[in-house]
Amino acid sequence: MPTVRISPRDYWRLLAVYLKPQWKLVGLLTLLLLSTTGLQLVSPLILRQFIDRALDGTALNTLFFIASLYIGFAILIQVIKLFETWSAEYVGWTATNNLRADLALHVLGLDMSFHNAHTPGNLIERVDGDVFTLGNFFSRFIINVLGNLLLTIGVIVLLTRIDWRIGLTVGLFAAITITALMIFGRFTSRRFMAAREASAELMGFLEERIGGTEDIRSAGATAYVIRRNHEFAREYYRRHKSAMILGSASFSTSNLLTVIGMVVSLGVAATLYRDGAITIGTVFVVFQFTQLLIQPVEEISRQLRDFQQATASIGRIRELQAIQPTLADGPGAALPTGPLAVEFDNVTFSYGLDQPILRDVSFRIESRQVLGIVGRTGSGKSTITRLLFRLYDPDEGAVRLGDVDLREVKLADIQTRVALVTQEIQLFHATVRDNLTLFDRSIPDTRIEEALERLGLHEWRATLEDGLVTMLASGGGGVSAGEAQLLAFARVFLRDPDVVILDEASSRLDPSTEARLERAIDTLFAGRTAIVIAHRLATIERAHEVLVMADGQVVEHGDRETLAADPTSRFAEMLRAGHDLVTSTEARP
Amino acid sequence: MSPWKLITSLGTFHKWLFFLTGFSVMMSAYILPLVPGLIIQRFFNDLSDNTSAGANSWTFLGLIVAVGVARSITMVLGASEPIFHAVVGALLRKNIFERILTHPGARSVPVSSGEAVSRFRDDANAIGMFLSWTFDPIGQALMLVLSLVVLISIDPLLTIGVFLPLLAIVALVSQMGKRIERFRKANQEAIGNVTGLLGEMFGAVQAVKAAGAEGRVVGHFRTINDARRRATLNDKVFNEFLESVSTNLANIGTGLILLMAAGQIREGAFRVGDFALFVSYLGGLSVAAGFVGQYLTQWRQIGVSVNRLTALMQDVPVTDLTRHGPVYLHGPYPDLPPVTSIGVDALELLEVRGLTYRYPGTGRGIEDIAFTLPRGTMTVVTGRIGSGKTTLVRTLQGLLLSDSGEISWNGRTIDAPDTFFVPPRSAYTPQSPRLFSESLRDNILLGLPEDQVDLPGALHAAVMERDIDTLEDGLETMIGVRGVKLSGGQVQRSATARMFVRPAELYIVDDLSSALDVDTERILWDRLFARSGITSLVVSHRRPALQRADRIIVMDGGRVVGQGTLTDLLRISPEMQRLWHGHYDDDEEGDDDA
């Protein structure tokens, strides 16, 4: 279990950041709250007037007036409460939505190693689920607890004015009750945190498996996966149960304490009445006030219960925020304009504790050149592209773009200057337009149409019901794997990068479709530096140079035509072995 | 499903816990709170009469404490409520999840998996909550009857005078609740959009990062969040309005008593104790009335959650949602089925006739497919993108539900291909295999007992044996979300090993080549052929596969446009010629351009 300690400063910081922009509304909310508190305190005093005057035999008209006043106040409270709810919810949702967006941005900014270790389902729970719990904290906690504390203090002050002993009794019990709740709170908070974590794990499990039903079904592994579900469900149930039992115990303790507080103060009031010190109307007011106090104390206790959950959530949010990308953004060295040379200088790299996936890799491509990388799967080809994007930093050596070390450059600059087409493309449940531009609204429709046309996707485009604003089904339903790959090309066409990387980008295409793509690729490569990782001769054919990778090392590098012509080169051997297709690095019989 | 049905079918799932919930809630919230009011009445009346000794007051007060203790105990028992609620949630999730896993695998849920997860969480919780509130209306009715009896015995006219308008208002307010359903639905949809986008965003993180689109994606996320805030605000404020009306009615009711009873109080006919009793019951009753409103709202809203959950299960009777079955929250887990062998039904001939599947909406798909797979042969399905190759192998296996057509195994018609085409009859490697965040070993075995299968053999067949050595912890390596710690080819070959470790008559492989180099692919085919009696159906457009094939099926526009050996097809099928020569032609063009 994580052990992030939550200090009051954490709450304060969250509040300050997310409530400050809404200070006007927060002010209004506070005002509304103070008014309802005041009105609630006045109401019992009206009752006392009524009872004492009625027993004194005051005129009926006066009594009717007092009664009407009481009703008027009740209606007023009602109306103010409604406004209060609206503004509290508005403030809460605005604050939490901002927090959600900030967290999402933070998480997207974290390293791939973080994402490799966390399922999307788990992250949904942390960015949405935890923040949801916090919504109450933002909108109501501070304001409600503050309001209720005010009400409590108000009641105690008024009771003390009646008789200090009653005030003291009630104050004492209120203090004891709230303290008891705080102590309970500390324990329950930890259990709630554990329960929420188990919930996140269960949801992560479900999300991943629901995405893989085709595999599970066809492997006949249904029973096994269902059993795993039972294991996750049991863990969640156990932790949830333990949190809930403690929560109930704390709730019931507070109830008992308030009852005792009421009883003792009523006893004192009764004695005072018998001594003739106070009227029966005053005894009734004491009863009313102690009744009035049950609600805020229970409310405070309920809020504390939510608060426990909120504390658990804040803990997890802080934990998430505390994770920093290990790749610090560069200081912002400028990249030269125009096409860029790419250089790997003695690069060694491993994912975590694995054996190095790249060992001492060095090569350089001049600008406007096309480099083909070939090698067996797992030889480190894709890792090269990941390093070039600075999704990871090399353990040793340096990667340079236009002779500038990537670590010196702003990540945003790398992303604008380098474009990547991979084999896997993830489509969003969003419009075709947003899917192609990745939500960049500044790209005009004409450019998108042009890109689709160029890629031979105009037939597909014609089937779209609402044109570019057609919503794509989630998970890319209705788009074939090959079409999705062409869409990935379209994404790159819509940008104007200086370096283009194709990572096995056309592997899902049949030869005939690929042919259509070829001319488009020519346009794409014109005036740009390109790296092509591919299995097909057709794509490698455009390479000026070829790099042969094996087991994370460069085993051959040179001019393509020269290598192909040299019968002793590995590349030539691969050409012979693969007939029409390239890429083996090891000669096999 | 009606809320009644929901209660009877789910309430009986864990009877004693359900009734404990009922007992504790009725006692702590409705019955016991009535007692202190009666004691307070006596207390005030005694006090104003000034007849009894002071000690008597303390007796009354002692009684109140005793009731308080009893109430506290029932409140602790009230923990049964969230626990019951969790048990119900576990049952619902299990039923839906099981159902999703038995549904044609390629279209298992009609929504994104992120959205599905939000339903698993929120809607299952809403139903659990609804169930745990079942006894509240009973408690409220009891409370209403008991308190009315008491109050009428004191002053019938005042009772009716005060309560009738209150009841009228409560009824009116709950009538308005019909709107809530609409707000709720809009709200749930908005939540689904948010979680769906988050899932896609984090699933595509590498692409988002590479495109530098973090800010823009989050911008889109903000828009969707705003929509959700609007939906939630409507839903919540309306709900709160209904609730707070009922709660504040107590105060208005008290005011009404004052108005109506002013004369009687002045004359001493209606005493302070009676007033205290009225006020105290009024408070309790209006809170209860508020619950009635809330419960009625839940009663209407719960259908939305039920529908959203049943939609996940797709086309099954809604009773499947609430079907009882073990949830294994305690005790030993269920045994896994043993590894079965094919026995006497070994594949001799698989025949497919008229197989048709059209995607809902677009109408694209496959049309009238016919072919046969004799034992020991390799058949390759080829065709350009979008020609229906993947749809064909999915429909054959029941991963998509065919619209028409017949499949027969050794002459026997297969009625339910989805349950038939599993090991030990067939095993499959999908085009984009999914691996899960567990160890590589668990991903390959997926629950098979290691001592009963040939894991090293499967790794060898999948040309995976060398990769194992290079991984950090070998087979125990935790491969990360969807297997990201592996290369694309390793993911594909792990999935292939997952296929080979399952004894099967027919191996179906969808486009293995996309992440494999030719060399590896060739070794793979060699090793496949080394296994005797293997029948295989392979989607590929690669030459090594086409050259190996005993028979090739050429697809175009969802139809079979050619079938036969490579030599025959190259002679007679224009589409095959295009596919075979396609990139050669292009090479020349490319060279010309260069």
Image (cartoon, coloured by chain):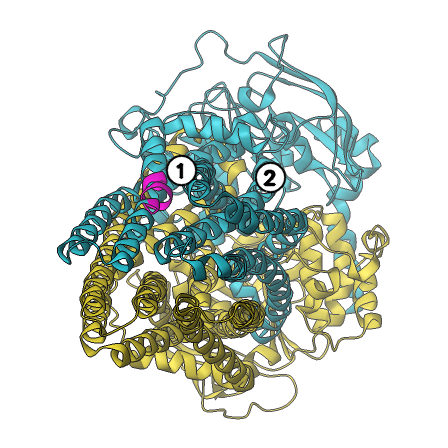
Residue drawn at x 71%, y 26% is B565
- Image x and y of residue A544, in percent: 63, 71
Does residue B31 belong to the magenta stretch?
yes
Label 2: which secondary element: helix
Q: Is residue A258 visible?
A: yes
| Residue located beneath label 2 in the image | B303
Q: Secondary structure at mark 1?
A: helix
Q: Which residues are magenta?
A: B25-34
Q: Amino acid at mark 1?
A: Ala
- The span from disc 1 to disc 2 (Cα, nearest Å) is 19 Å
Locate the N terminus of chain A and report the quarter of the image it occupies.
bottom left
Residue A432 position within the rendered picture, expressed as x and y whole percent measured from the top left:
74, 60
Q: Chain of mark 2?
A: B
Colour yellow belongs to chain: A
Residue position marked by numbered label 1 in the rendering: B90
Q: Is residue A482 left or right of residue B267?
A: right
Mark yes or no: residue A534 visible.
Answer: no
Q: Most extreme residue toward the left, as rendered?
A: B55
In the image, residue A310 lies at what x, y percent?
A: 36, 65
The hue used for chain B is: cyan
The chain under label 1 reads B
**Magenta portion: prevailing SS class:** helix
Judge if badges 1 and 2 mark residues of a common chain.
yes
Query: Relative to A465, is A16 on the left or the right?
Result: left
Mark in front: 1 vs 2: 2
Quarter the C terminus of chain A occupies: top left
* Residue placed most toward the observer, A199 or B466: A199
